[in-house]
Image: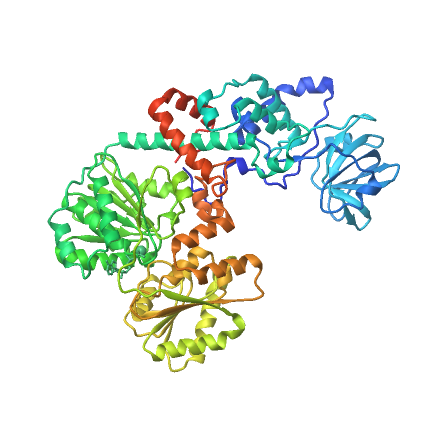
Amino acid sequence: MPDMQHEKPVFYAAPENTVPMPTARKKPASAKKAAPAKSLRTADKLARLGLGNDMALVLHLPMRYEDETQLHTIRDASAIHGIPVQVEGVVTDCDIQYRPRRQLVVKLSDDTGLLVMRFLNFYGSQATQMAVGKRLRVRGEVRHGFFGDEMVHPTVKSVEPDAPLPDALTPVYPAGEGLSQGLLRKAIANAMTRIDWSDTLPENLREALKLMPFEPAIRLLHNPPPDVDEHALAERSHPAWIRMKFDELLAQQLSMKRAQAARRQQGAPVLGAPGALTDALLRTLPFRLTGAQQRVLEEARADIRQPYPMQRLLQGDVGSGKTVVAALAAAQAIDNGYQAALMAPTEILAEQHFRKIASWLEPLGVDVAWLTGSLKKRDKEDARARIESGTAQLVVGTHALIQHDVDFAKLGLVIVDEQHRFGVAQRLTLRNKGVGSVPHQLMMSATPIPRTLAMTYYADLEVSVIDELPPGRTPVVTRLVAQERRDEVVARVHAAALEGRQVYWVCPLIEESEALQLQTATETHELLSAALPDLRVGLVHGRLKPADKQQVMDAFARGELHVLVATTVIEVGVDVPNASLMVIEHAERFGLSQLHQLRGRVGRGAAASACLLMYQGPLGPVARERLGIMRETNDGFEIARRDLAIRGPGEFLGARQSGQAMLRFADLETDQWLVEKARDVAQQLLATQSAVAEAHLARWLGAKEDYLRV
Ligand code: ADP
Ligand code: MG
């Protein structure tokens, strides 16, 4: 699968602003001649939208409806702003203008006034359609242009005088480039005459679930009757929508359960009982496992004992102690004669893991290899050789681990930290490095995924949660501080340093430009160094050479720096217990989970810790709410839940994950109850009515083989 970073699900390929093209008028003679070539192209375009077969077309439901049941006069229309209106008139002028850029300008008049229409990208056929004397019905928003009232890119239809107005809402479909609404409507209407309308849900089940039958639901959504509850339709709470959402979620649950079954067919090494190494590690650790760590470790152990690959997500809030669980699982793999690999998304994080885990395992005689892109060629070759021969028992690194020239001798366990930072393809690549069998996979994330998401996007993952922090932590107190009070913040930094504490100062995230972010960090470093001449202030950012970066981080960890000015490179995993104050500038620009991750860098020791979120006012209502959440709670799950409510799941998961998130109709937040129903029904069908399950899957997967696939 390609990296989905910029790829949206096919069904959203049509942004709202796709300009609907006018319905092509047919000229009987030429239309016949051109038909084959044209229909071929249309089929291609439809296929590109994932609409390669009739059922896919029928399940291509409108994103909204247009009310074309009303007609305004041009005079009345020019008083209506912000919403589209429909007018009808006769073309009095049709002209291609070249200034300020090439455009088609058409003047339309009725008895009450004149309207100018502008088309920037237009086909020659449109000029013909809108020739002087033609009667047109046009729909768009009226704007006051320089030369009077105008519509830019209205939808245009040729009509006979006194043509009747439609008495139902007109569906507007997600469309792709070059696919007109008219064309889609026709293709869908045709498909509706051909498909098998049978209901995939047995009557008694459907009634028990109080769901609308399939056929009337589909027909209503494509052609809502005049008396339909328009609000329910727009909100997608209409029973017809509920039926479609349920069917979609059911297909998703079924398909994921099927993937799970397929996974169980794959062979994986049986990593039986923990052995001498695991025992020794437990004995020599400088702390005892918390109850939660013990529990999730047992859960993972139960999985890796099986002859099919584990696929487990280990969730635990920042600082909950996931690393040691990973190390213990790795020790068990090594005890059983297999290699383990740990991959982290950044060099800083990977190196931190390496240092920590090596400090635990090397004294016990384990060969731990270190592999990242920035290693010298010789060191890289050496690491690869040890990995290939099997002398390296544990390998820690970055993306370098999944390069094609890295071959493992006997890979039994793959651990991916901050798994949401990797694409699906990258995780699969590492998993495919097993020889003769599929390694077990343990994924770790500090970004808690709310229940509904875990149930849908991650239906094929077992989830373990560390819901307890190691003892001796004090909760971080979070305060919001306006940018104007920066001096007070600097004074607070000074005071903390005098108490022997250390401080992180995180510079604003500048989305557009890494260079700018760097510049800000450098400036902040200079300003703080000048304002706090008696303190040692360090600077770390992503552009530093790894060795320099490490040097600064080490100095901070050893307490040789009071203040560490940083970009978001310190977001994950950095662990300095003596740091008890964190300042985040322009906190309003950060995502909530990112703020939570950053904040997790403090509160790691016994000292009371604080996080100061500086913001640039005035804050809008959403920004205010978001920062308010940070102040109110330290619970990553609660933050994620509320973040999801504000932003919606697509954004929550981030671009990479949303590649998997291909629900078209259901909304995970508002339709949570449906998700749960669908999951139960999926389980029930697979257990007792597998033919029904197959029929339902066949209908919904149809031409879309990747759709809903994990
Ligand atoms: P995260 O879950 O964020 O990856 P880490 O694994 O980095 O957390 O653990 C955070 C800190 O807590 C580390 O310094 C780690 O050594 C320490 N730690 C982990 N488990 C325990 C425990 N049971 N008792 C005390 N400290 C622990
Ligand atoms: Mg970690």
What is the residue that sits farthest to the left in this orientation? 276
Q: Indicate the position of residue 79 as horizontal and vertical percent values.
A: 80, 46
Colouring = rainbow
Ligand 1 is found in which quarter of the picture?
Answer: bottom left
Place of residue 429 in the rendered image (x, y in percent of width and height, measured from the top left): 32, 41
Image position of 590 with respect to 676: above or below: below
| Image quadrant in which the N terminus is located | top left
| Quarter of the rendering containing residue 285 | bottom left
> Which residue, as the protein is rendered here, is positioned at the far right?
111
Which residue shows up at 38% across the image and 20% down it? 691
Nearest to the observer: residue 197 or residue 534: 197
Q: Residue at x 50, y 46 (%)?
A: 648
Residue 145 on image: x %, y %: 78, 49
* Residue 210 in view, yes or no: yes
Q: Is residue 646 left or right of residue 34?
A: left
Q: How many marks?
A: 0
Rendered-image quadrant of the C terminus: top left
Residue beneath the point at 83% across and 34% down: 91
Outermost residue toward the bottom in this view: 534
* Relative depth, front residue between 460 and 113: 460
* 610 vs 320: above or below: below
The quadrant in which residue 440 appears is top left
Please, is residue 351 above or below residue 63 in the view? below
Work out whether residue 445 or residue 145 is closer to the camera in this orientation and state it. Answer: 445
Q: Residue 702: in sight, yes or no? A: no
Across and down, in percent, residue 602 comes to 35, 65
Identity of the residue drawn at 29% across and 73% down: 559
